[in-house]
Amino acid sequence: MASVWRCGRAACRAGRALQAQQAPIFAVSRPRRVRCQSSSASSSSSPPLIYPDQPRSVKHNDLASFLRYAERAGLDTGSTTYVGTHYEYTTAGHLAPLGFSLRRVGGASDRGIDLLGTWTLPLSASSPSPPAPAEPLRVILQCKAGAGQRVGPHLVRELEGAFVGAPVGWRTRAGTDGEGGSEGGSGNSAAAVIGVLVTEKPATKGIREALARSRWPMAYIFCPRSGRVQQMLWNQQAEKTCGLAGLGVTLRHAVDEVEGAYTHVVLTWQGKPLPPVPAQSP
């Protein structure tokens, strides 16, 4: 039976909980008109994003090249480095059909940010009541993998810290509405910024409450190491700032010749499933 998730006054509306394989999925509860960026922001395109350079020691740029490098270097597949790097590339690949275009930027001075990029909602003219075109959302993303990783409110606090130390192009201020709040409040950025936390476990009650209290626009994604996204939810600040009203989440059942039957997250717009989008280069 569907139920709406709310957390006190700071209601964290990721919508109606759908039960599937013990992984609750949340969709936006009441589709509403999307709050697009201001006319002044949308009329002038943002400057091209400049991604930080990876450390020179990095010998890979996607999952396939990492696996080849790990084999040549004889990396221990149980090590923290191997598990973490593998999970980051896996996450980037499996979020691509949802409209994410992400690049791995982790390093000694990454301030906790593992992936940077954009999120273009896969809406088209065929979508019911599509919003006016707007700049893709800018994404700062943290991955948390490993058997010993504890999922709790402390991870939300870590992600809040990542907003403060984000690279140029992904900087914003807490509580802004996408109209002049990015890049130190200069008013020149047409794109909102959302922080995304991805873990191998479903969101706990503590995670949900921490998201609800946060003044930063945030989303949470449960993505097992297999890569099939099982849960996606966001807080009220993300809905307000990033124009996510009308967007929802549901599970789709599918069958693969190798894997067999499986489920994965599908985005919906005003209750209708959106098609996957082809992978893009960030």
Image (spheres, rainbow, N blue to C red):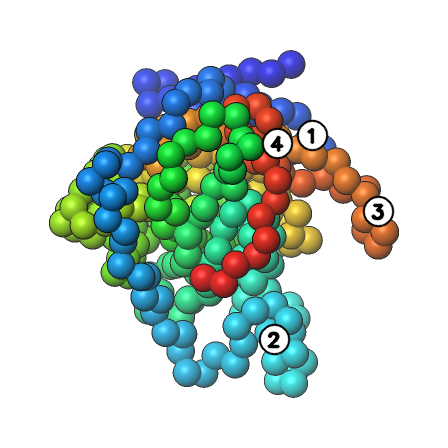
| Amino acid at circle 4 | Pro
Task: Give the secondary structure at mark 1.
Answer: loop
| Amino acid at circle 3 | Gly
| Amino acid at circle 1 | Ala
Q: Residue at x 64, y 14 (%)?
A: 1
Q: Which residue appears farthest toward the front when viewing the image?
A: 125
Q: Of the residues under marks 2 and 4, which one precedes in the sequence? A: 2
Residue annotated with mark 3: 260
Quarter holding the C terminus? bottom left
Q: Position of residue 55 (x, y in %)?
A: 40, 78
| Mark-to-mark CA distance, 1 and 2 | 34 Å
Q: Residue at x 56, y 69 (%)?
A: 62
Q: Nearer the viewer, mark 1 or mark 2?
A: 2
| Mark-to-mark CA distance, 2 and 3 | 27 Å
The quadrant in which residue 65 appears is: bottom right
| Mark-to-mark CA distance, 1 and 3 | 17 Å
Tell me if residue 100 comes above or below residue 112 in the rendering.
Answer: above
| Mark-to-mark CA distance, 4 and 3 | 22 Å
Along the viewing direction, whichever of 200 and 129 lies nearer the viewer: 129
Q: Residue at x 52, y 59 (%)?
A: 280
Residue annotated with mark 4: 273
Residue annotated with mark 2: 65
Task: Give the secondary structure at mark 4.
Answer: strand
Residues at marks 2 and 3 touching, judged by CB atoms closer than 8 Å: no
| Amino acid at circle 2 | Ser
Residue annotated with mark 1: 20
